[in-house]
Amino acid sequence: MQIKRRHLLAGAGAMALSTASGARADDVLQQIFNTRSRSAWNDQFDGRYSAGQTVQTNQPIFSPATLGYVQQAISDYQMIEASGGWPVVPSTTKLELGVVDPAVGPLRRRLMISGDLDRNAGMSNAFDSYVNTAIKRFQTRHGLPSDGVVGEYTFKMMNVPVSTRLMQLRTNLVRLETMANSFLGERYVIVNIPAAEIEAVENGRVVQRHTAIVGKVSRQTPILNSKINQIIINPYWNAPESIIRKDIVPLMQKDPNYLNENAIRIYKHGDLENEIDPRSIDWHDPATPDYVGKLRFRQDPGKINAMASVKINFPNKHAVYMHDTPQQGLFNQLMRFESSGCVRVQNVRDLVVWLMRDTPGWDRRSIESQIKTGESVPVELSQPVPNYFTYISAWSTGRGAVHFRDDIYGRDGSTDLQLSSAY
């Protein structure tokens, strides 16, 4: 069921009015803090700690512990909703350390209710070190840069009503239940699409986390289960037909040297002996996309190769894979939905070393040496590693440590969770 933005804003406005007076705000907070289920939360607070548990853990997203914490989070958020929710924080000005502004009061109440700021921090209009630490925690829980500055993106995340977050938690609980109690393997890899993050899990613990670039809305990364069975060092890149039609043809119309400058060669499928000269093709002919879409566009290995140093293969009907990238700056972006469906992996060589650990003759030193040669070498893994592409936009790593991400592909049932549409 879709929740209309105007209904949410109306509800949010009502919540803001209900907490306008200090007495009412204190009543709401007192109800929440006095609830038995919250009594176990740590009430001690200083400039380093917030009310709930730590946000970063080595707990896999698919684990019985995560499932239990999400169930508890649903109970906590039901109680928050029943107590009047949290106030809307006015987004009229940027809030940061040292600022004194009337909006800091609602900000403090908002952070206390969600468990990011301890109630012993007190109420005032001053953005002090307590609030700064709490904001960083809130930002980490929401996949935002933890800079302690309340700007546009933090305001958007903060002002999603508790009723919408509760719905998001329930939706994701169903997804988690299908996997969290299953045996996924002693070693496995999880790609969480909304979080644009990868977990390498071993013996029930996350041993590596990697930032990822996943598919844009128009070319979505699919949900899948498979096994990583091959690593290609210094891979050739074969452009998918969709990229040939949608990207390469328009680029060649603008710049006839594009293919040569990017070391991309054209062949007929099954014939790598006879290269086709790009100058023999009329790139402006309306029939060209249909013609070249049937050809093979292969990029030579090298630093400008679309997959850079390594490609991680696994059988799947979508023809997607994981890989390195020469565009390392993309990993610093807030919204990392830039690919055509495949997954780019930051610090991918660390992941490759872990994947190839049981394959004789391949360790970090030999992998790095092979990369330096520039020669393309496929390596079959002695022990294929299960991998899972999943869509989890809300989960929890502990009491009061609930994570939310942008519902980038619009699968959670409310357009108000597709916050990137407004970025």
Image (cartoon, rainbow, N blue to C red):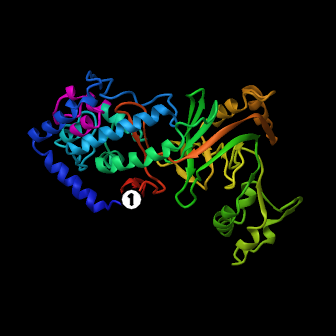
Vertical position of residue 412 compared to residue 208: above or below: below
Quarter of the image containing the C terminus?
A: bottom left
Q: Judging from the image, what secondary structure is the residue with disc 1 in?
A: helix
Vertical position of residue 45 compared to residue 26: above or below: above
Vertical position of residue 206 compared to residue 110: above or below: above
Which residue is drawn at the image coordinates 47% and 28% (left, top)? Answer: 57
**Mark 1, residues whose alpha carbon is within 10 Å: few (<14), some, or many (≥20)?**
some
Residue 4, image quadrant: bottom left
Instruction: List x then y, in percent, for residue 319.
Output: 69, 54
Instruction: List x then y, in percent, for residue 371.
Output: 76, 36
Specify whether 345 is left or right of 7.
Answer: right
**Of residues 244 and 112, which is closer to you in this image?**
112
Which residue is drawn at the image coordinates 39% and 27% (left, top)? Answer: 54
Q: Which residues are magenta?
A: 109-133
Residue 111 among those drawn in magenta: yes
**Farthest right residue in view:** 273
Instruction: List x then y, in percent, for residue 161.
Output: 29, 49
Count up the numbered dots: 1
Q: Three-letter amino acid code at disc 1?
A: Thr
**Of residues 63 and 423, which is closer to you in this image?**
63
Quarter of the image containing the N terminus?
A: bottom left
Q: Which residue is mark 1?
A: 415
Which residue is drawn at the image coordinates 67% and 70% (left, top)? Answer: 253
**Of residues 251 and 109, which is closer to you in this image?**
109
Which residue is drawn at the image coordinates 77% and 67% (left, top)? Answer: 294
Report whether residue 164 is seen: yes
**Farthest bottom residue in view:** 286
Report whether residue 159 is seen: no
Residue 332 among those drawn in magenta: no
Instruction: List x then y, in percent, for residue 144.
Output: 41, 41
